[in-house]
Amino acid sequence: MRPLLVLLVAVSAFAADISKLRIYELAKPGVAVEAAQVPALAAEAYAAPHTMGMPNPAYRLSDIPFLGAHRKEKLDLYFPSGPKRLDRPAVVFIHGGGFTGGDKAEYRSASVSADLCRAGYVVVSCNYVLGPKDKPGVWPQNIADCRNAVRWLRAHAKELGVNPDKIAVAGGSAGGYLALMVGLSDDKTGPGGDPAAKHSAKVSAVIDMYGVVNFSKHGKGIVPGASPAEQAAYLPESQCDAQDPAVLILHGTADSTVDIAQSDDMAKALRSAKTPYEYIVVEGAPHTFDLHPKGKGWKRTGVVAGAEVSSASDKPDLTEATLDFLARTIGK
């Protein structure tokens, strides 16, 4: 295993947007941190007084290389405060941006990552190759990059105090699609898979936040470079089965960017495939929300452990429902 090298750069333009999230860097900008130093830096976070809510801070190591020296894409690593543990569950979060833009440090990514971190999870927020669907080298490399974020986390689980068998993947919009592909399609033979990888990219839970899930419907088109026979391999709807991890879908009825019918279709496909799932529809919520969307409340349906589930809230906040899903699938 290659040494874990953390390269920290100056605080980006995103910092001003996320200042109210109380995210604190564990190392100074420009400082290189070797693998042996990571546990000590994490201990600073674990030693801090812990509360579930604000103003409890989240601690972050930014801009960590995970795809090799030849790649510019990096990831951010969030450590929770509280007792030091060697078996914390972890979540990989994938940003959105229409596959052509976005960043791991955008407000939504940072907000969700910080919320999960405050709840006790180690969080990786990753970048991936960006570009139009018809640009060579983008598809399925973007899926491969996200799989490799999971592999990186698993490879360094011991240093990070993570249980390698308790990893979830989450994402919003384009990131929701990528999270579904990581969670539902085969990590060796599926798009962006690697049959020779030393570490598995399999996960134990998936959170899809208003993801683009079917490029052949609702005006989204097809994935360029894939033959008609290969298209199904890129559609999460056709990749789910009863052996897949549980999926949580979050979508708002006022989403004018990604048709909520896409999440309706995804939920139907999961039900048909007997994949455990929960589908939360937030009344009045627009696109690109974090765990605190605007709206009028939500309704949840799905199948958990073979039983129908149904619940509702008159408040739009999704924090408790999301943490409940993670606690049941990867622990806490």
Image (cartoon, grey):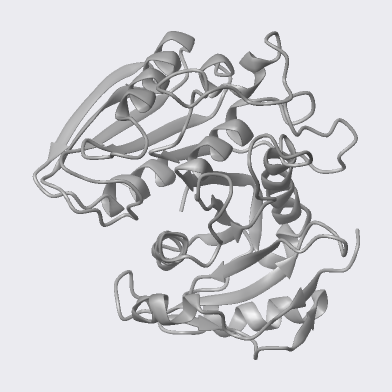
Q: Position of residue 213 (x, y in %)?
A: 48, 28
Name the residue: 37% across, 27% down. 263
Quarter of the image where the N terminus is located: bottom right
Residue 101 appears in the picture as rendered: yes
Left or right relative to 240: residue 319: left
Quarter of the image where one finds residue 191: top right
Left or right relative to 182: residue 245: left
Name the residue: 75% across, 75% down. 6
For residue 129, above or below residue 27: above
Q: Position of residue 247 (x, y in %)?
A: 45, 31
Left or right relative to 76: residue 119: left
Choose between 41 and 222: the one closer to the eye. 222
Residue 204 appears in the picture as rendered: no
For residue 40, above or below residue 143: below
Q: Position of residue 262 (x, y in %)?
A: 38, 25
For residue 216, above or below residue 196: above
Choose between 328 and 72: the one closer to the eye. 72
